[in-house]
């Protein structure tokens, strides 16, 4: 009688997972060619591995379900499942009526497509316009001169930057996002208005988990710097890197 030891099973599972990871890299290269080129394979692989772990938390363990979940990470940010901008994602994942993981992943993907088309445009024209607008008037300039309170200025800036997304989100969600950006800036010791302003725009454009997203390792690395320096040094560096990243997408 054939006996398979636990270590053999683990080896089989590891081999299967490695094969899935390679298949997902090829999937990203084919369906998200700009992501693959701009992010590079190491960041793509790290994002896929994170997606396997995050997906498993929601009960997604088949290749089909994980492929859909990971694809949405590249569309919406690696922490889309807990992004306050995307309450429908958390609602779908928490919906007890969707007991079958395949049904849940398909429903999540369908709702995401509906959201992406409304926000980005049928051909991505809305998001490209928002990126071009950011290049024409960089994010920190949009908060100058510093008149009024930060929260009211922030909502105005976001509407001017990407009106289609703001219309879809609604001001209540935008208020939550602004509050989260202020808290994130405080967490990273980015004081004044410039830090929260940059955090807000990065959250708005890249997803609320921008600061730990493996798709943007340069953000986490810059924010992790804690050497004594003038208060705005990290903000300036993060700003410069953000604009360089934007230029790659606009090229």
Image: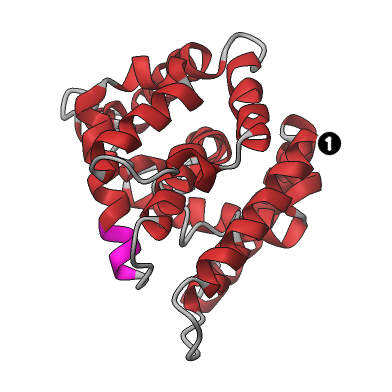
Q: Nearer the viewer, residue 176 or 212?
A: 176
Residue 102 appears in view: no
| Percent x, y of residue 32 | 72, 34
Q: Answer above or below: position of 212 versus 124.
A: below
Q: Answer above or below: position of 177 versus 231.
A: above
Seen at 42% across and 43% down, the residue is 145
Seen at 44% across and 17% down, the residue is 163
Q: From the viewer's perspective, is 4 left or right of 56?
A: right
Residue 201 appears in view: yes
Q: From the viewer's perspective, is 78 left or right of 236?
A: left
Most common SS among magenta residues: helix
Quadrant of the frame with the C terminus: top right
Q: Answer above or below: position of 99 versus 206.
A: above
| Percent x, y of residue 138 | 60, 42
Q: Nearer the viewer, residue 1 or 250?
A: 250
* Residue at the limit of the structure toward the top, as seen here: 122
Q: Nearer the viewer, residue 101 or 177?
A: 177
186 is within the stretch colored magenta: yes
Callout count: 1
Disc 1 element: loop
Q: Answer above or below: position of 186 versus 94.
A: below
| Percent x, y of residue 30 | 79, 33
Seen at 77% across and 55% down, the residue is 40
Q: What stretch is highlighted in magenta?
A: 183-187
| Percent x, y of residue 130 | 58, 26
What residue is disc 1 on? 251
* Color style of the picture: secondary structure
Seen at 50% across and 90% down, the residue is 227
Q: Nearer the viewer, residue 221 or 135?
A: 135
């Amino acid at each position: 009688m054939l006996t398979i030891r636990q270590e053999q099973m683990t080896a089989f599972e590891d081999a299967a997972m490695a094969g899935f990871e390679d298949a997902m890299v090829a999937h990203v290269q084919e369906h998200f060619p700009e992501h693959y080129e701009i992010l590079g394979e190491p960041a793509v692989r790290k994002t896929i591995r994170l997606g396997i772990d995050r997906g498993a938390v929601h009960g997604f363990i088949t290749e089909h379900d994980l492929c859909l979940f990971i694809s949405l990470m590249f569309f919406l940010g690696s922490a889309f499942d807990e992004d306050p901008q995307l309450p429908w994602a958390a609602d779908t994942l928490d919906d007890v009526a969707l007991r079958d993981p395949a049904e849940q992943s398909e429903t999540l993907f369908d709702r995401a497509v509906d959201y992406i088309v409304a926000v980005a445009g049928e051909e991505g024209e809305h998001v490209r316009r928002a990126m071009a607008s950011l290049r024409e008037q960089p994010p920190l300039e949009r908060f100058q001169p510093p008149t009024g309170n930060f929260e009211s200025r922030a909502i105005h800036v976001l509407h001017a930057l990407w009106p289609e997304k703001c219309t879809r989100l609604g001001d209540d969600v935008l208020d939550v996002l602004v509050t989260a950006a202020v808290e994130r800036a405080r967490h990273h010791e980015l004081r004044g208005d410039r830090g929260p302003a940059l955090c807000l725009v990065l959250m708005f454009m890249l997803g609320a988990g921008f600061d730990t997203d493996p798709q943007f390792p340069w953000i986490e690395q810059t924010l992790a710097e804690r050497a004594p320096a003038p208060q705005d040094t990290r903000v300036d560096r993060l700003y410069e890197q953000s604009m360089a990243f934007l230029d790659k997408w606009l090229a």
